[in-house]
Image: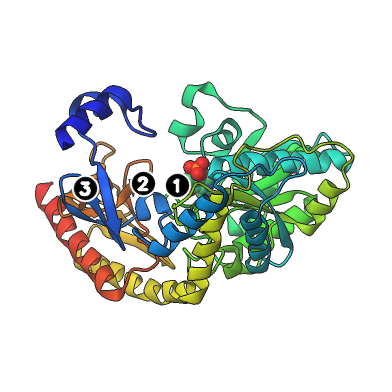
């Protein structure tokens, strides 16, 4: 059966973010057939630890029967209903209320989408719409950060800074600028700093605040390499936005719904964004759902508008997707999963510290909740990386895969290993992951 599926896969299925040559000629895809908890099972019966929650999204783990039941119940009532002009549905309304309750307190309304890219495109359009309504239509540009990943729809791709995505098919909208992240001292206004020219503040001054609609950032950068901002950074960006009348969009697509040990990552730094993109963990991947949470201020501008808000997707407010998300949040709260994540952070960080002590090439370990990474350097002390062709993280991730643990290699030289297991993972399971990584680093070290 597996052989036949592989054959058909190669022939008919164009995969996202995959080298087509690899798919067509060399590799055969691992075909997932089932899952339970932190484990995913392949069509040939192998058991894998899902160390990245698939794509940072299966937060409650696989095979959660309550989520299945929530979907089934809603589907048998009414699987889909339009939310366009004059129509609504129960799960979408109830979820909107729940989101308002758990989000930062200025965010009390939601615009639903089907995923993260659509959410960010929506946030950009709402930002521009907001400034048009405020009589400042020339405020159109978006500032994003280097290393950012905001998705692949045309506007989201323009904000995504990872070069392969940013340049793909030459599809940039323009009007998106990139600043270097985490120049804390510069953000605070020290113009004598040698890096000042790459800071957000410099970019605003150079372009003119009257041309800038919004700044978008991931509170903790995910696909760019799991970068946790230094203390004070997000507060400083919030201040900049207030100073220059710019909207702040927090992209919580990975971070939201408990991933970092708080319901939303912005809670760590106590900031309130104007718009907040959500997706992935909202439904633990059991249904395709995203959204943009909207501040009271922006909502007021929208509801005062005389015309039609000419933006929306067939699946905006999809009842089945929303029913699953409601149940997902109910379980997060009932089982105190966000607190559990905060506790597991220590176990994971202890494991990473152990790896750093044991292996001379392991460095820059970091974890916030169950979003973690470490880097592999030839000589961490001297800050010497492996040569670009080595791709140390890719090799270690391959060794982990051989040992039935799925992780992901990130970074320009594939030097970062990312770890983001389902939030329900326990101490023993984390220790098992660390032990596999330990063996994999040893195998890599022996091979070079
Ligand atoms: N924003 C962030 C931070 C992401 O990590 C992703 C996907 O990984 C997206 C946006 C895009 O989401 P989607 O793939 O659902 O369109």
Q: Which mark, by number, is residue 410?
A: 2
Q: Which mark, by number, is residue 98?
A: none
Q: How many marks?
A: 3
Label 1 packing within 10 angstroms: few (<14), some (14-19), many (20+)? many
Residue 386 is at least partly visible in this image: no
**At 70% across and 58% down in the image, what residue appears?**
238
* Circle 1/circle 2 CB separation < 8 Å: yes
Q: Residue 64: x and y, percent?
A: 38, 62
Q: Label 3, label 1: how many angstroms apart (C-alpha)?
A: 28 Å
Q: Residue 426: x and y, percent?
A: 31, 73
* Cβ at disc 1 under 8 Å from ligand 1: no
Residue 423's quadrant in the figure? bottom left
Q: Horizontal placement of 303 versus 59: left or right?
A: right
Q: Horizontal placement of 134 versus 263: left or right?
A: right
- Residue located beneath label 1 in the image: 224
First in residue order: circle 2 vs circle 3 = 3
Q: Horizontal placement of 353 versus 232: left or right?
A: left
Label 2 packing within 10 angstroms: few (<14), some (14-19), many (20+)? many
The furthest residue to the left: 446
**At 68% across and 38% down in the image, what residue appears?**
312
* Cβ at disc 3 under 8 Å from ligand 1: no
First in residue order: circle 1 vs circle 2 = 1
Q: Label 2, label 3: how many angstroms apart (C-alpha)?
A: 24 Å
Q: Label 1, label 2: how many angstroms apart (C-alpha)?
A: 7 Å
**At 55% across and 33% down in the image, what residue appears?**
153
Q: Which mark, by number, is residue 42?
A: 3
Residue 82 is at least partly visible in this image: yes
């Amino acid at each position: 059966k597996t052989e036949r599926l592989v054959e058909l896969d190669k022939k008919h299925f164009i995969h996202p973010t995959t080298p087509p040559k690899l798919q067509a000629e060399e590799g055969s895809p691992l075909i997932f057939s089932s899952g339970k908890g932190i484990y995913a099972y392949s069509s040939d019966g192998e058991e894998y630890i899902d160390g990245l929650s698939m794509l940072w999204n299966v937060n409650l783990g696989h095979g959660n029967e309550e989520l299945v039941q929530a979907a089934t119940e809603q589907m048998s009532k009414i699987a889909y209903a339009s939310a366009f002009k004059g129509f609504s549905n129960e799960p979408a309304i109830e979820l909107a209320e729940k989101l308002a309750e758990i989000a930062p307190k200025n965010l009390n309304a939601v615009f639903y989408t089907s995923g993260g890219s659509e959410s960010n495109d929506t946030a950009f359009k709402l930002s521009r719409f907001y400034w048009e309504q405020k009589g400042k239509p020339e405020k159109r540009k978006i500032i994003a950060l280097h290393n950012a990943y905001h998705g692949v729809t045309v506007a989201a791709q323009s904000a995504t800074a990872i070069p392969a995505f940013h340049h793909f098919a030459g599809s940039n909208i323009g009007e998106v600028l990139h600043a270097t992240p985490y120049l804390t001292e510069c953000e605070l206004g020290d113009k004598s700093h040698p890096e000042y020219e790459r800071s957000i503040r410099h970019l605003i001054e150079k372009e003119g605040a009257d041309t800038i609609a919004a700044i978008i950032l991931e509170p903790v950068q995910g696909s760019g390499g799991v970068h946790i901002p230094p203390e004070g950074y997000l507060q400083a960006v919030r201040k900049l936005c207030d100073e220059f009348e710019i909207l702040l969009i927090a992209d919580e697509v990975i971070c939201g719904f408990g991933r970092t040990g708080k319901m939303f990552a912005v809670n760590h730094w106590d900031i309130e964004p104007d718009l907040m993109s959500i997706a992935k963990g909202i439904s633990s991947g059991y249904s395709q759902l995203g959204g943009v949470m909207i501040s009271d201020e922006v909502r007021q501008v929208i509801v005062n508008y005389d015309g039609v808000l000419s933006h929306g997707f067939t699946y905006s407010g999809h009842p089945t997707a929303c029913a699953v998300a409601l149940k997902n949040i109910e379980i997060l709260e009932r089982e105190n999963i966000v607190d559990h994540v905060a506790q597991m952070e220590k176990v994971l960080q202890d494991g990473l510290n152990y790896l750093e002590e044991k292996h001379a090439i392991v460095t820059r370990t970091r974890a916030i909740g169950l979003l973690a990474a470490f880097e592999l350097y030839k000589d961490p002390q001297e800050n010497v990386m492996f040569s670009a062709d080595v791709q140390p993280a890719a090799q270690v991730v391959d060794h982990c895969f051989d040992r039935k643990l799925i992780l992901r290699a990130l970074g320009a030289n594939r030097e970062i290993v990312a770890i983001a297991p389902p939030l329900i993972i326990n101490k023993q399971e984390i220790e098992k992951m660390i032990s596999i990584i330990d063996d994999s680093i040893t195998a890599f070290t022996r091979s070079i």
